[in-house]
Amino acid sequence: VRDRATAAAIVALCPAAVALSLTPPGNNKIVAITHAAGRMGKALALQIREDAVLSGMPSEELPNIRAIVRSESEAMSVKCDLGGMKMEGGNMAPIAIDWLETVVVEDIENEEALRSAFEGSGSAILCDASHNEIVWSDGDDTENQDGEGMCSISVPMRENNDLSKRLLAEIDAASSCPSLRRVILRSSMGLSSRVSKEAAEAMGGEAALAGPREAEKALKSSGLEYTILRLGALTDDGGNMPLIFGVNDAILEKRLDSTTSRRPPILSRADAARVCTFLLRETSAFKGLTIDCAWHPKFGRSSVGSEEAVNAAGRQDLKKAIQNGVFVW
């Protein structure tokens, strides 16, 4: 407790200096990512590292990534996708990268193994909450009133219960890690206390929301310094789109009130990873907050990669946009 209070005092006195680093001064530089073999998890690992490199951070202060996965095959997938592959002794092998560590925890009942996975880490991003995603049916004959392809909401029901149990176990393990200073939880829109039934259904209904709801509750009572990021439905489209932020499902409710398509707000996994990376860097400004996030409603799938969208995203001050969204909504 004393160390965390000291860290909080340093942040209050020198916020600008702390914001330059992804880890607290004098603390370790390991960032743990759970569900790291997922599409967003891999994007996160790359963006966190590249963000630090491009910022001009000294090499000795660059963050290392600890990818926490469920199996050896997932570990191999992370190594190959992030580092690439090479021919070695007639066989293909992953290219080792010195800033990446993979940790396999197959059984969440093994509490010691799970605690060890977080040991020594200064930050963690928990991505194990099952999350609904948009499945598009592209084609000229499937255009809807939004000018985008027809879509449906997919909820990974088979993994939903397992992931929810795993996430709760991870929060419990993280709370006992003395080095851990900050946690970001990937969660879902549709969880505010006064959300309408229609809005909750648009995000997958109770089957999709029960797990993230319990995880948020557990994290808030864990004693960890946290930020919760409630995302719209996820897509695999490209990133660098302008974003909108809010609270209490205001973005979700407004979206449903303004269209007949019943499609919830969306954003790509790449942009979700970009926001998580930003929050990791600016954690002192947003600790203890629950933030909704989606693509700005002015921009849809047809805008991905366009000059207008990329330029608008490049000009967007994320810190100001989040502050305006959190305190204006």
Image (cartoon, grey):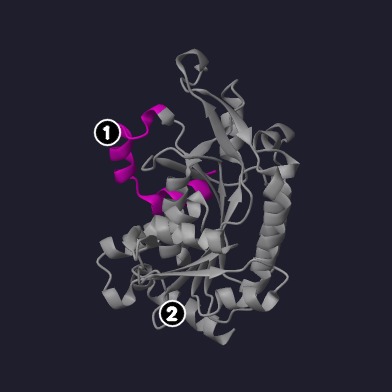
Residue 40 drawn above or below residue 58: above
The secondary structure that dominates the magenta segment is helix
Query: Secondary structure under badge 2?
Result: loop
Residue 317: where, in percent of width, then height?
Answer: 35, 49
**Mark closest to the chain's N terminus, 1 or 2:** 2
Residue 305 in magenta stretch: yes
Badge number at residue 28: 2
Q: Amino acid at mark 2?
A: Asn
Query: Secondary structure under badge 1?
Result: helix
Residue at point 43% right, 62% down? 79
Residue 180: where, in percent of width, then height?
Answer: 54, 76
Q: Decide if residue 277 is in sight here.
A: no
Residue 262 drawn above or below residue 43: above
* Range of magenta residues: 302-329
* Residue 128 placement: quadrant: bottom right
Instruction: Using the image as rendered, state which of residue 23 and residue 257 is in the foreground.
Output: 23
In the figure, is residue 183 to the left or right of 171?
A: left
In the figure, is residue 178 to the left or right of 214?
A: left
Residue 201 drawn above or below residue 261: below
- Tell me if mark 1 has few (under 14), some (14-19) or many (20+) residues whose alpha carbon lies within 10 angstroms of its own: few
- Tell me if mark 2 has few (under 14), some (14-19) or many (20+) residues whose alpha carbon lies within 10 angstroms of its own: some
Residue 87 drawn above or below residue 150: below
Location of the C terminus by quadrant is: top right
Q: Residue furthest top?
A: 141
